[in-house]
């Protein structure tokens, strides 16, 4: 039986269950220094000086650096989307002439222990000439630096004749939608541990995540090192979500300090730092127009939107704006389309990606648009979607624009079929009738749906090296990283399926730059598609070698042999001659020499895969208290081919929890002078287990991808993508005003205001 598609247990859980995981804070080295960051207390100002005398006099403080000590280091460069004037807006590891957000690093203190480092940081005094902050991304642009606008880039995409479509339109609708600022607030905060190995003459960075190979090269370039003189070692990660693992100022400072001091340096972020210094995300405003014919078919869509990028452009560049622009049309035909995304710098924490970046936002705007058009035209929201979905016969469907630097081609899909599957599963007509009856009795209950298209499997490559020893154990070395998504289990399943061995005999080694020359890491839901495909190819190579060797030893033709349950033998003959995989490996090594049997493979692609799905939410609103309960959540998702359905369901459940947070609770807010007022968990609200309902899953495999040999698509972001849109739609239905929600999150105060407008 194929192990791909089975609900096998995760291989990576044993260490975690036994409390033996190694997270960033767990690394401790002899003679280690502790680093503490001194951060700007104001949102915008000229940095006049930084007084360090008192801190340096404190017993146990080893050194204090300000911007002058690291002025020779270049700003942190981009990993993605180097466009227009973005390079002029990069962040230095310590502020040079200005501070641009509360939390901007202005100095670092190194001490013998973390408590002394914190005491020393309290004694550092920056002098800042305060300037007015820019907080509204929709306001006219200002000046980031002399000759550099706070609008450093505009992302434009489009196809078709938009002007002609609007000129001929029977109906034109125009709406504005807004998504608040929030992020992936992981249970584990960021951390860095760097030591200098004098024997090997190299820096070693422990506790890396997400993109260790990229960070290795970037740090080496910034410090003027040969890349062979620095290696990164991934640890366990207490939540990734796009936020952890990017290259931050603190990572570079730790590495530079370890190089300078020849002592290990450790930095562990506290929660307040995490809330004001780690990448934020979302915060966009959409101004959408749609040209619609009398039957409810959208003929054209035009959009201008604003991304509040924060104080600097970090490693993601304009990725979020680019993805928003590319993915806004979603699953609908939309024959003509034009969008302009304005990247705006504001005096807030810099932004990056967060799970389903640009899609959570654009899906909310698009699906709200569809709902509001349906309401204005008196069309059922489900029927409105039916009339506009791209039909299966048109797949693969080329949008004629680029996405993430690659052509946007929906590789496969049957969007109408998935919609009908969902409606059948919930008994849509009967469910709506029950909700209508409850509303007639005075309850505020409603149903909302939202359709989405995801992107996954971003290339351009992934490498795999696979080895089998004399004991038959398999080791896979890959340049990807694990942020908790089940990398080891999924890759082991794919290997076991292709090779014919027990998946439990497969060890997957990842996140170590000293073991494999290059790697793309873990982001954009890419691992199963990219590393999985490379793994299948390497396993196929080893399978051929094993069968070739067994053919000689068993004196049977290769065509007669197969590998199953770790044995090589005749197909269809359990009692026929056979050899164990370990016996075959030992025999080949005896004949040809060597310690292991190995194969290498690379999978390359210039196209992503495009999974798709639908969220359905049923909510009940308390009209007196403005309380909101989510009574039911259903997620229908076509993954192409499911390697491990349980892991997919886990991804959906985790993403949905975050989506509910962004829909109802989580938001970074600021005062008029740019002070963050969501800098503790007392003010930055989270959903608890009580607010997360049981989630119903409909995982389908109707549309395998044709862009990779496994037919798989990614699943990391499907649980969050349309959650905000579906919940907003359900709230509108519950209170009898489909257009009530045009902004996320629907916080308790905002819901109270919405209900007040009803009365």
Image (cartoon, rainbow, N blue to C red):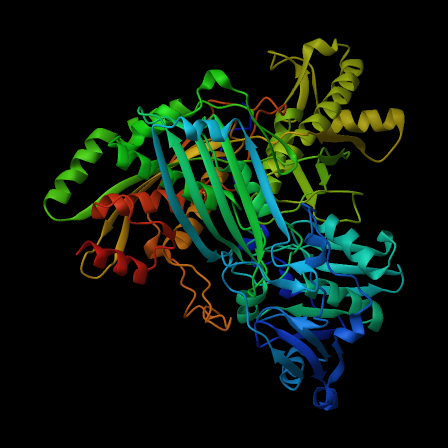
Residue 333 image-quadrant placement: top left
Regarding residue 344, the answer to whether it shows in the image is: yes
Residue 603, given in percent of the width and then of the height, sits at: 71, 30
| Residue lying farthest to the front in this orientation | 167
| Image quadrant containing the C terminus | bottom left
Regarding residue 31, the answer to whether it shows in the image is: no
| Residue nearest the observer in this picture, 659 or 144 | 144
The correct choice, above or below, for 34 with respect to 723 in the image is: below
Residue 68, given in percent of the width and then of the height, sits at: 78, 75
The correct choice, above or below, for 696 with respect to 545 in the image is: below
Residue 523, given in percent of the width and then of the height, sits at: 61, 44
| Residue nearest the observer in this picture, 752 or 535 | 752
Q: Is residue 740 left or right of residue 668?
A: left
Q: Is residue 617 left or right of residue 254?
A: left
Q: Is residue 167 left or right of residue 531?
A: left
| Residue nearest the observer in this picture, 165 or 625 | 165
Residue 469 image-quadrant placement: top right
The correct choice, above or below, for 180 with respect to 683 in the image is: above
Residue 117, given in percent of the width and then of the height, sits at: 67, 80
Q: How many marks?
A: 0
Q: Please give the name of the residue rendered at 75% of the width and 20% of the height, measured from the top-left corner.
A: 544
Residue 753 image-quadrant placement: bottom left
| Image quadrant containing the N terminus | top right
| Residue nearest the observer in this picture, 491 or 443 | 443
Q: Please give the name of the residue rendered at 80% of the width and 74% of the height, measured from the top-left corner.
A: 69
| Residue lying farthest to the left in this orientation | 441
The correct choice, above or below, for 251 with respect to 403 in the image is: below
């Amino acid at each position: 039986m194929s192990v791909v598609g089975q609900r096998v247990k995760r291989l990576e859980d044993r260490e975690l269950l036994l409390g033996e995981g190694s997270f960033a804070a767990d690394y401790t080295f002899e003679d280690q220094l502790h680093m503490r960051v001194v951060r700007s207390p104001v949102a915008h100002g000229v940095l006049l000086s930084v007084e360090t005398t008192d801190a340096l006099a404190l017993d146990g403080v080893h050194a204090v650096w300000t911007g002058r000590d690291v002025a020779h280091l270049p700003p942190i460069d981009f990993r993605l989307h180097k466009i227009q004037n973005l390079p002029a807006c990069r962040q230095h590891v310590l502020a040079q002439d200005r501070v641009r957000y509360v939390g901007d690093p202005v100095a670092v203190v190194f001490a013998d222990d973390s408590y002394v480092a914190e005491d020393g940081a309290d004694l550092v005094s920056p002098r800042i000439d305060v300037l007015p902050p820019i907080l509204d991304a929709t306001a006219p642009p200002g000046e980031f630096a002399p000759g550099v606008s706070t609008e450093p880039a505009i992302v434009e995409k489009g196809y078709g004749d938009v002007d002609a479509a609007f000129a001929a339109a029977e109906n034109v609708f125009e709406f504005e939608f807004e998504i608040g600022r929030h992020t992936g607030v992981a249970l584990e905060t960021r951390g860095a541990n760097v030591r200098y190995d004098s024997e090997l003459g190299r820096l070693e960075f422990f506790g890396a995540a997400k993109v260790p190979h990229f960070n290795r090269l970037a740090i080496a370039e910034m410090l003027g090192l040969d890349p062979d003189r620095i290696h990164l070692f991934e640890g366990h990660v207490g939540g990734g979500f796009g936020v952890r693992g990017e290259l931050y100022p603190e990572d570079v400072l730790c590495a530079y300090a370890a190089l300078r001091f020849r002592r290990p340096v450790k930095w562990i972020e506290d929660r307040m730092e995490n809330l004001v210094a780690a990448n934020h995300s979302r915060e966009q405003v959409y101004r959408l127009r749609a040209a619609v014919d009398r039957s409810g078919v959208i003929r054209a869509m035009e959009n201008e939107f604003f991304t509040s990028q924060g104080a600097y452009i970090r490693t993601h560049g304009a990725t979020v704006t680019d993805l928003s622009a590319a993915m806004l049309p979603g699953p609908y035909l939309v024959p003509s389309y034009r969008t302009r995304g304005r990247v705006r710098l504001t005096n807030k924490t810099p932004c990056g990606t967060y799970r389903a970046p640009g899609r959570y936002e654009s899906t909310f705007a698009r699906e709200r648009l569809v709902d509001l058009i349906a309401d204005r035209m008196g069309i059922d929201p489900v029927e409105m979607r039916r009339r506009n979905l791209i039909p299966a016969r048109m797949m693969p469907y080329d949008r004629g624009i680029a996405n993430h630097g690659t052509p946007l081609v929906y590789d496969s899909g049957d969007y109408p079929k998935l919609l009908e599957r969902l409606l059948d599963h919930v008994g849509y007509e009967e469910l709506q009738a029950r909700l209508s009856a409850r509303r007639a009795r005075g309850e505020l209950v409603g149903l909302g749906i939202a359709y989405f298209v995801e992107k996954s499997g971003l290339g351009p490559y992934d490498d795999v090296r696979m080895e089998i020893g004399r004991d038959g154990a398999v080791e896979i070395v890959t340049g990807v990283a694990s942020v908790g998504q089940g990398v080891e289990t999924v890759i082991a399943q794919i290997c076991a399926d292709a090779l014919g061995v027990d998946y439990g005999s497969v060890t997957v080694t990842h996140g170590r730059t000293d073991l494999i020359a290059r790697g793309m890491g873990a982001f954009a839901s890419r691992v199963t598609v990219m590393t999985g495909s490379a793994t299948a190819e390497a396993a196929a190579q080893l399978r051929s070698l094993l069968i070739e060797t067994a053919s000689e030893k068993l004196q049977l033709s290769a065509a007669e042999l197969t590998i199953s349950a770790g044995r090589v033998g005749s197909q269809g003959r359990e009692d026929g001659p056979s050899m164990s995989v370990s016996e075959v490996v030992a025999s080949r090594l005896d004949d040809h020499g060597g310690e292991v049997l190995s194969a290498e493979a690379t999978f390359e692609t210039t196209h992503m895969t495009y999974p798709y799905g639908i969220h359905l939410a049923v909510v009940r609103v308390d009209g007196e208290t403005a309380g909101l309960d989510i009574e039911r959540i259903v997620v229908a998702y076509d993954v192409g081919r499911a390697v491990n359905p349980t892991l997919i369901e886990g991804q959906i459940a985790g993403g949905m929890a975050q989506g509910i947070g962004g829909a109802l609770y989580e938001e970074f807010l600021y005062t008029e002078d740019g002070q963050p007022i969501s800098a503790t968990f007392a003010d930055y609200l989270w959903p608890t287990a009580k607010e997360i309902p049981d989630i119903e899953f409909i995982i389908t495999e109707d549309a395998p991808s044709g862009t990779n040999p496994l037919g798989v698509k990614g699943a990391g972001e499907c649980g969050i993508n349309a959650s905000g849109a579906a919940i907003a739609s359900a709230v509108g239905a519950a209170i009898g005003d489909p257009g009530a929600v045009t902004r996320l999150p629907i916080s308790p105060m905002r819901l109270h205001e919405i209900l007040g407008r009803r009365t």
